Amino acid sequence: MWTYQPAVEALVDIGDLEDYPSDRIPGLYERLSSWMPTLIEHRCSYDERGGFLRRLKEGTWPPHIMEHVALELQCLAGGPGGFGRARETSRRSLYKVIVGTWHEDITRAAIHLARDLVMAAIEDRPYDVGAAVAQLRDLADDLALGPSTACIVAAADDRKIPFVRLNDGNLVQLGHGAAQRRIWTAETDLTSAIAEGISRDKDLTKSLLRACGVRVPEGRLVNSPADAWAAAEEIGVPVVVKPYDGNHGRGVFVDLTTREEVEAAYGIALEEGTGVIVERFIAGDEHRLLVVGGKLVAAARGDIAAVTGDGRSTIAELIESQLNADPIRGTTDAHVLNVIRVDSAVRIELARQGLAVESVPSEGRRVVIQRMGNVANDVTDRVHPSTAAAVSLAARIVGLDIAGIDLVTTDISRPLAETDGSIVEVNAGPGLQMHITPARGEARPVGRAIVDHLFPGEANGRIPVVGITGSRSNAMLARLVAHLLQLSGRRTGLASSEGLFIDRRRLRAGDCTSWECGSQVLINKLVDAAVLEHGPRRLATEGTAYDRCLVGIVTDVDAAATMPDLWLDDADFVFRVMRTQVDIVLAPGAAVLNAHDAVATSMARLCEGAIVLYGTDAALPALAEHRASGGRAVFVRDGRVVLAAAEGETVLFQRNRGAAPAALGGALPFECVLPAVGAAWALGLAPDLIETALATFDADQPVAVPAAA
């Protein structure tokens, strides 16, 4: 009832502070604006920069302040900000504070921290804003989607594709039911398990690429330090020693020329993987090229990590001050580069230069610390077309729909053959952060490329969803709509007050109108269409399991059916709750509204889609007015159901008047039949099919097939 996006609603009792708006609390404005200077970006009701601070100075109440502080804490912790509201209830001093969320637990914590911060500002006590933000950041690191997954989800959201998080990690469903696709970071349900297995076997990958004419360095798998040196002699130094299945450049040693270097590198590389490869050293820079659906979409170049001596600091100190202090380095997925740790690999690299970690290099001396694993500079626009074709071919040979291709070349703008460049690895599930927030160069819309790959053209991952609400139970109506969809050939999921059904099979009995049951329908890959019933209390306490629906039905609105325990205690609040079903109808869809109910009919103005009104009497003023304006209507004439539109009328069972089921209007009441027919009409079902569904529907039987044992 508040917003299309997920939100947390908190009840906040401010007690005696009801008599103390912000302009009556000395120093409150100054404290809050100094503690959180970024609040100046909040526009508030004035719709201008600084609008909220203006309200704070003029006078506003603590719940409104708390709302803005909670939103800003989320922003400072790396969240998207978003929707917020503070609304009075009918009881003095009790408010509802609504805060948009990207993870419920993070927003709950932000609301509690906002309360503490606002109270500290009111009472003129110190408050550590930085510590509060750090607490939320730590929580976000643990709970929020990783940056690669988040950028794909954001791209899906931009295209109005619904998404559902399926676990506490990065497994996300994009779309609903049978139209869904799944991602796990940068892997998709189109990523072949065989291809992923091939990519993990670097020796096999190279042999397949070489067989298809792709440039790869000579090399082989080795099984001991002595064998590593033997391979180096076969290939010819300099060589590269690297883990058979490592990542992030860990344990990779390049430009090795002596037996001591090769054998020492073997031991460390083995610690980083399950085997070791020795291959020919390719002179040039490390590059990572991202291929999605056979197309190059982004490329980044790596740099050698080095420090410059100042004649005073040790190399360990220079690593911290010159490399790890860079904000692009960190320990979380949100950082483009990892922090450099002084490990065996670093010590070997330093030893090659005659140095140790404790050494103090002379002023101006450049010391190489790490040669690999520092890919952070965008070079997408410089990639030569033949190189783009080569990496696309490499991804297809391995069989990956999304691949991170590592190659080495001195100049990415020239063909690999001219620079003696080579592809050195093909990786499944590549990290995207280097392309999302490169250290230098243009950020690339890699999330959008992945979403476009999964949902080409106009595909949006949606199945027909029919939402039903009303003050009375609508179980029979929901079952009839599901029956209509099933006869149209769609495997239909139904969650109603009679139970949870998938394609006529009952999975659960009893009231299944909850958010949880609706979600179970929408994540089921068998489901081609969904029918979900919601009472007003479910809408008020849980919202819907879907963001939008193709058809929304409102059967009746009982203004007296208030919910005082939820502080929804007048007719306006009841209306606001139940209008949700109409608000979320998609533009290609329709709202089906009861013309006998003036409140339900008044919701027509809120719908982005078409309107289908229904009633038992064509002479109803609402029906007559709607038909006069060219709208569609469903009503009863001479005991027959009529579908009326600007282009004419269709009368069900007209061709054979004796074919109308005897139960129509009796066991199968018109108050159930008419909205079901209206929904079927809005979904494009043919009149013959609608007639068949009405004739074959068993009003007394809630399930046709028993659940499996």
Image (tube, rainbow, N blue to C red):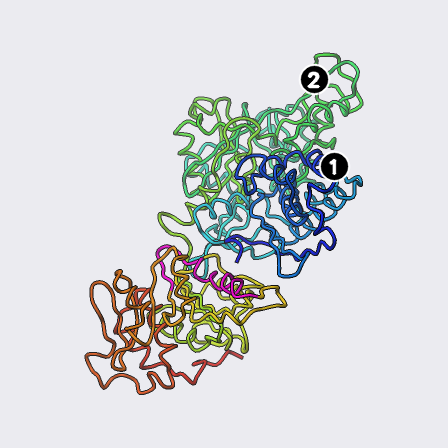
Residue stretch rendered in magenta on the structure: 570-591
Q: Which mark is residue 679?
A: none
For the point 49% across and 66% down, the residue is 521
**Quadrant hosting residue 617:** bottom left
Give neighbour class at mark 2: few <14, some 14-19, many 20+ (Cα, 10 Å): some
Q: Which residue is mark 2?
A: 308
Which quarter of the image is occupied by the C terminus? bottom right
For the point 73% across and 24% down, the residue is 321
Res. 247 visible in picture: no
* Secondary structure type for disc 1: loop
Q: Is residue 137 left or right of residue 568?
A: right
- Residue 148 position in % (x across, y down): 55, 43
Give neighbour class at mark 1: few <14, some 14-19, many 20+ (Cα, 10 Å): some
| Residue situated in front as seen by the camera: 282 or 396 | 396
Res. 630 visible in picture: yes
Q: What's under tag 2, amino acid-wise?
A: Thr
For the point 71% across and 41% down, the residue is 134
- Can residue 588 be found in the magenta stretch? yes
* Secondary structure type for disc 2: strand
Q: What's under tag 1, amino acid-wise?
A: Gly
- Can residue 471 be found in the magenta stretch? no
Q: Is residue 318 left or right of residue 74?
A: right
Q: Is residue 86 above or below residue 601?
A: above
- Residue 526 position in % (x across, y down): 44, 66
- Residue 74 position in % (x across, y down): 64, 44
- Residue 397 position in % (x across, y down): 43, 43
User: How much space separates mark 2 and mark 1, taking CA atoms?
Assistant: 49 Å
Q: Which residue is mark 1?
A: 27
For the point 27% across and 83% down, the residue is 660
**Quadrant hosting residue 34:** top right
